[in-house]
């Protein structure tokens, strides 16, 4: 690492001194809820062999990724709410940036694989089981996490070579673009900008593929009652997850790259953490309520827990 700084000061909480106890309780409850719903869904899928199907394996990977991303944020954030000084080591800041970016990109990668899975299931049912075998699905899920992790790792390595002139970051947590903005004026950030733009292009292509696949599915399903029912049952949760994810990420990207310094800090903080609050809670609940098999297993789990209490 070439940076001359050992710590970064996070100033995102500077305007919340009065409300910190309330924020701590709400954040702790939110994190506990995220852990509960995601771990419950993962446990249900892992323990029940009847759910060892492509769609549920990908859903399991989706929830694990949600746990990975939120664990990179909430423990540090909760500690900051109790601490008078909000600092993070420079190496810790780079690690957090790596976790945040790889989590977000992995979500989009997994959603792309889910869209491909639904396309095969509805449009090419005879080839579905050969193309989406358990081994292939596990490999796709693994690459959906590992590839973004490596791509974002390259981005973070490029950032680590920069010399920083300011240790003050006006955010609740570290992200790569905010670290680059702290670089000294004479530092060459051309490579960072090129890689960042390439990453944006790659994941915009992911988004376009998902949109195309669902448009094709709608066109295919509109004339078939059976396919229409299958689409409503299994594709609608994916669409809701995709829209929720894209809206929250776009708001944060616009806030980072375009936001005015005149915007209220609390408002900027809210936009920044949307993708760490809404999707990790909403996704397991959406799938839990919409997918019949998951709903049945969850109801059985609740009934069993209630009997144990009695």
Image (cartoon, helix red, strand yellow):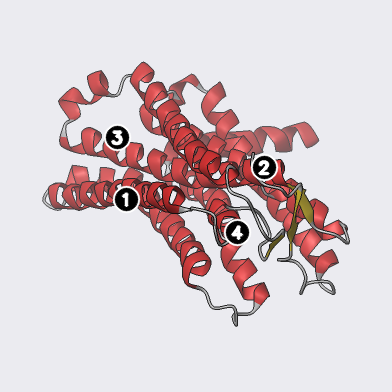
Tag 2 and tag 1, C-beta contact below 8 Å: no
Where is 149 relative to 37, above or below?
Answer: above
Quarter of the image that includes the N terminus:
top right
Which residue is disc 3 drawn over?
A: 117
Q: Position of residue 65 (x, y in %)?
A: 54, 38
| Residue positioned 42% across, 52% down in the render | 190
If you read the primary sequence from the N terminus, does the residue marked by circle 4 or circle 3 appear first?
Answer: 3
Q: Nearer the viewer, mark 2 or mark 3?
A: 2
Residue hosting label 4: 184
Q: Nearer the viewer, mark 4 or mark 3?
A: 4
Q: Residues within 10 Å of mark 2 (few under 14, many from 20)?
A: some
| Percent x, y of residue 153 | 51, 37
Residue at the farthest front position: 186
Query: Which disc, if any, is residue 71?
Result: 2
Among numbered discs 2 and 4, the one appearing first in the sequence: 2
Mark 3 or 1, closer to the camera:
1
Cα distance in 3D space between marks 2 and 4: 31 Å
In the picture of the structure, the residue carrying the numbered disc 1 is 201
Residue 155 visible in rendering: yes
SS class, disc 3: helix
Sequence-earlier tag: 1 or 4? 4
For label 3, count other residues whose C-alpha is less than 10 Å away and answer few (under 14), some (14-19) or many (20+): many
The reply, left or right, for residue 39 in relation to residue 308 is: left
Estimate the spatial distance between the alpha carbons at disc 4 and disc 3, rounded to whole Å: 46 Å
Q: Nearer the viewer, residue 89 or 82?
A: 89
């Amino acid at each position: 690492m070439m940076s001359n700084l050992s710590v970064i000061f996070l100033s995102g909480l500077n305007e919340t001194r009065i409300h910190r106890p309330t924020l701590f309780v709400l954040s702790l409850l939110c994190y506990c809820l995220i852990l509960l719903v995601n771990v419950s869904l993962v446990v249900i899928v892992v323990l029940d062999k009847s759910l060892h199907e492509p769609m549920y394996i990908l859903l399991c990977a989706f929830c694990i990724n949600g746990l990975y991303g939120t664990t990179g944020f909430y423990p540090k954030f909760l500690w900051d709410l109790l601490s008078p000084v909000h600092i993070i080591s420079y190496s810790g800041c780079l690690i957090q940036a790596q976790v945040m970016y790889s989590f977000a990109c992995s979500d989009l990668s997994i959603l792309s694989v889910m869209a491909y899975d639904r396309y095969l299931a509805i449009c090419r049912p005879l080839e579905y089981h050969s193309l989406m075998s358990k081994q292939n699905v596990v490999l796709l899920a693994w690459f959906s996490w590992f590839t973004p992790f490596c791509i974002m790792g390259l981005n973070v390595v490029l950032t680590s070579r920069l010399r920083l002139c300011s240790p003050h970051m006006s955010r609740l947590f570290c992200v790569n673009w905010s670290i680059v903005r702290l670089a000294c004026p004479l530092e060459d950030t051309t490579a960072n900008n090129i890689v960042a733009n390439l990453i944006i292009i790659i994941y915009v292509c992911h988004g376009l593929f998902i949109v195309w696949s669902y448009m094709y599915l709608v066109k295919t399903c509109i004339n078939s009652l059976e396919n229409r029912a299958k689409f409503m049952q299994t594709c609608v949760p994916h669409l809701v997850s995709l829209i929720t994810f894209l809206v929250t990420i776009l708001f944060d990207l616009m806030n980072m790259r375009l936001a005015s310094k005149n915007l209220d800090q609390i408002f900027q903080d809210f936009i920044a953490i949307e993708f760490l609050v809404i999707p990790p809670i909403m996704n397991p609940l959406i799938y839990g309520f919409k997918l019949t098999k998951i709903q049945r297993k969850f109801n059985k789990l609740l009934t069993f827990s209630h009997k144990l209490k009695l």
